[in-house]
Image (tube, coloured by chain):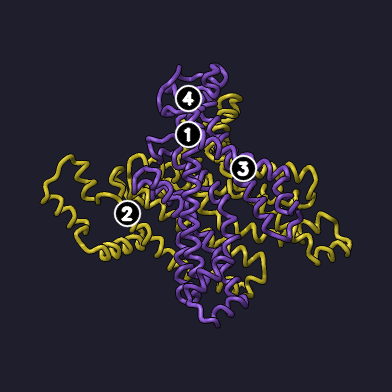
Chain colours: A yellow, B purple
């Protein structure tokens, strides 16, 4: 069986290659669509440039070559891990991204876990008591969370919990004044995480709850669930183990499909909470018109999406033996 | 009374319909109720809602009338929502229908293209498009349309493949219909309704994306939008939270209305749901 999963993994990786090639191509075309090239940017920063200097700059960066040569050059760079240089910050784009990645992961991973956990729980509960007042409340909450813009929820959270009640810090990742270490630092960071993580997971929790409710309703009608009930298993065991495990699969697929959207939502949430992650870096890149950095982040995020989907596929194989056989 | 009307006249359908009609009415009435530029300073800054009956939703830090901003913002939201949904439906249907109809190599190529656009995080991609091309309302519409079509393409492909397999299509083929006529006159019209149903949810998502972009400052600086109002209100969040709260409530109600209406239309077209 392990062989089946390994084979599946290898096939998925090979399938990802043309997609990543396409992402690099789209990124390159976007860069070409920007008004002015790198030489114009550098000349603009120095204040003045002679036509000879511009020609020399273009020759140095290969901008005088045909477009397809430039693309091959760019592709070669990307494959070797060189995402270009942020001319505003004077650092390689990859260095900047890797520096901010841990903060973003600290936000994303708990948000995914919280969203999928609470979403599946709420959706499952709503499906078990379909039509009851509990189902009504959960469904209404889902509709509201579905319609409310994430960043606005974050702002209102700051007003309520940060400014009025003063329970939680209003932004940042740690208390800038205090010099903390060890457990105190971890606790302080956790306090700073509460609002952004809850904000980010709210929409996705609603999404998963809705999906889990529908897929649980289908699963509960299946024959094997009736069989499990007939042989006298406890209602909890039937719902959670027999129906729940099968209802899980569509939700798992959705977690993979929504990985990209979650990263996008992260940009807004990190901006609202001044969280020093990739999203905040993207926002700063917009403000400084640092296109190299912005497109580097888009590329790195796309690779992340591919990786997340790869992981989801593997989990899928583990959760459902039929996938391994196919 | 037909089943469709019965479903529309449930509380869910009525609330959705009222909210969407309200949004449309606000957009239409804006130049008439608030003829002045919503970006002009008209009153004392930082008036709370209800403090001055002439400015019932209050004013912002620059003394701009929030009510006027909300009404004019409805126009921008609606315009972006409708146009971006149209762009997305056009691209998605074209790509998906061609893939499902042609099959083979062309299908593989088109679906790989779809996958590429599905892999790039939509909101980040939209940010990049607007940042590269410059912040104008046309570019915002293009960016949202360009990033939201992959789901439609998948749906359109599945629908076209299902219709393509039906007998009447083979009959048309036997009568000598050309490929383009087969697709445009026989297959597509029968595959279109499940695709069009997604329009209202697509609009809702486009409006949320537009708000996110303009919150980050990526919108036409000469137009007032709900997202840019929330962004401006953020600067006075500690003392005057209503400046960010009011446009957010307007946006949430509009999106809620579109989502509810989308659900109901979905139910109406699915004969298996009870009415």
The answer to which of A8 and A129 lies nearer the viewer is A129
In the displayed structure image, the side of residue A151 where residue A300 appears, left or right:
left
Label 1: few (<14), some or many (≥20) within 10 Å? many
Q: Is residue A79 above or below residue B21?
A: below
**Residue B30 picture location, percent across and down:** 49, 32
Q: Considering only order in the chain, which callout, 3 or 1, is on the residue closer to the N terminus?
A: 1
Q: Secondary structure at mark 3?
A: helix
In contact (CB < 8 Å): disc 1 and disc 3: no
**Residue A281 picture location, percent across and down:** 41, 43
Tags 4 and 3 on a common chain: yes
Residue A169 visible in this rendered orientation of the protein: no
Please name the residue that numbered disc 1 is placed on.
Answer: B72
Please name the residue that numbered disc 4 is placed on.
Answer: B65
Please name the residue that numbered disc 3 is placed on.
Answer: B257
Q: Is residue B173 above or below residue B20?
A: below
Camera-near label (4 vs 2) is 4
Distance Cα–Cα, label 4 vs label 3: 25 Å
Q: Secondary structure at mark 1?
A: helix
Distance Cα–Cα, label 1 vs label 3: 19 Å
Tags 1 and 2 on a common chain: no
Distance Cα–Cα, label 1 vs label 2: 34 Å
Q: Residue at x 34, y 48 (%)?
A: B133
């Amino acid at each position: 069986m392990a062989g089946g999963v390994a084979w599946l993994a290898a096939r998925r990786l090979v399938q990802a290659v043309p997609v990543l090639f396409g992402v690099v191509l789209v990124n390159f075309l976007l860069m070409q669509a920007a008004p002015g090239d790198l030489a114009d940017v550098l000349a603009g920063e120095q204040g003045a440039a002679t036509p000879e200097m511009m020609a020399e700059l273009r020759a140095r960066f290969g901008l005088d070559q045909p477009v397809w040569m430039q693309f091959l050059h760019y592709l070669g760079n990307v494959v070797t891990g060189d995402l270009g240089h942020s001319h505003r910050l004077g650092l390689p784009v990859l260095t900047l991204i890797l520096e901010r990645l841990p903060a973003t992961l600290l936000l994303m991973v708990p948000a995914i876990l919280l969203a999928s956990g609470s979403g599946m729980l709420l959706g499952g509960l709503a499906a078990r008591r379909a039509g009851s007042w509990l189902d009504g409340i959960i469904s209404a909450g889902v509709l509201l969370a579905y319609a409310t813009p994430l960043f606005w929820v974050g702002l209102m959270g700051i007003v309520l919990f940060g400014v009025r009640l003063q329970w939680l810090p209003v932004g940042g990742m740690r208390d800038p004044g205090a010099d903390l270490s060890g457990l105190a630092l971890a606790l302080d960071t956790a306090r700073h995480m509460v609002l952004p993580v809850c904000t980010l997971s709210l929409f996705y929790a609603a999404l998963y709850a809705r999906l889990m409710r529908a897929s649980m309703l289908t699963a509960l009608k299946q024959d094997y669930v009736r069989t499990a009930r007939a042989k006298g298993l406890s209602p909890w065991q039937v719902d959670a183990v027999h129906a729940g495990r099968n209802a899980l699969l569509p939700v798992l697929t959705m977690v993979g499909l929504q990985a990209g959207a979650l990263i996008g939502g992260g940009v807004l949430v990190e901006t609202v909470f001044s969280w020093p992650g990739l999203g905040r870096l993207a926002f700063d890149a917009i403000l400084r018109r640092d296109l190299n950095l912005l497109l580097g982040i888009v590329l790195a995020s796309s690779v992340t999406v591919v990786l997340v989907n790869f992981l989801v596929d593997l989990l899928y194989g583990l959760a459902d033996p039929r996938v391994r056989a196919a | 009374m037909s089943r469709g009307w019965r479903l529309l006249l449930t509380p869910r359908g009525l609330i959705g319909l009222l909210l969407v009609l309200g949004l449309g009415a606000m957009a239409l009435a804006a130049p008439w109720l608030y003829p002045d530029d919503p970006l002009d300073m008209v009153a004392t800054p930082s008036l709370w809602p209800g403090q001055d009956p002439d400015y019932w939703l209050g004013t912002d830090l620059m003394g701009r009338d929030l009510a006027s901003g909300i009404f004019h913002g409805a126009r921008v939201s609606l315009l972006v929502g409708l146009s971006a949904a149209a762009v997305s439906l056009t691209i998605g249907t074209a790509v998906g229908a061609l893939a499902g109809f042609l099959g083979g190599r062309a299908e593989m190529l088109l679906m790989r293209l779809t996958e590429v656009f599905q892999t790039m995080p939509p909101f980040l991609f939209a940010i990049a498009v607007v940042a590269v091309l410059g912040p104008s309302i046309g570019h915002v519409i293009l960016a949202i349309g360009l990033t939201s079509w992959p789901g439609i393409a998948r749906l359109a492909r599945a629908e076209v493949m299902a219709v393509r397999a039906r007998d009447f299509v083979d009959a048309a083929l036997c009568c000598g219909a050309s490929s383009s006529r087969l697709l445009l006159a026989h297959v597509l019209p029968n595959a279109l309704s499940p695709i069009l149903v997604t329009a209202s949810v697509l609009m809702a998502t486009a409006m949320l994306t537009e708000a996110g972009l303009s919150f980050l400052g990526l919108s036409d600086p000469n137009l007032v939008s709900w997202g840019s109002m929330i962004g401006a209100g953020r600067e006075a969040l500690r003392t005057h939270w209503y400046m960010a709260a009011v446009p957010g409530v307007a946006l949430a109600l509009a999106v809620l209305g579109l989502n509810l209406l989308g659900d109901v239309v979905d139910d109406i077209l699915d004969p298996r749901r009870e009415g």
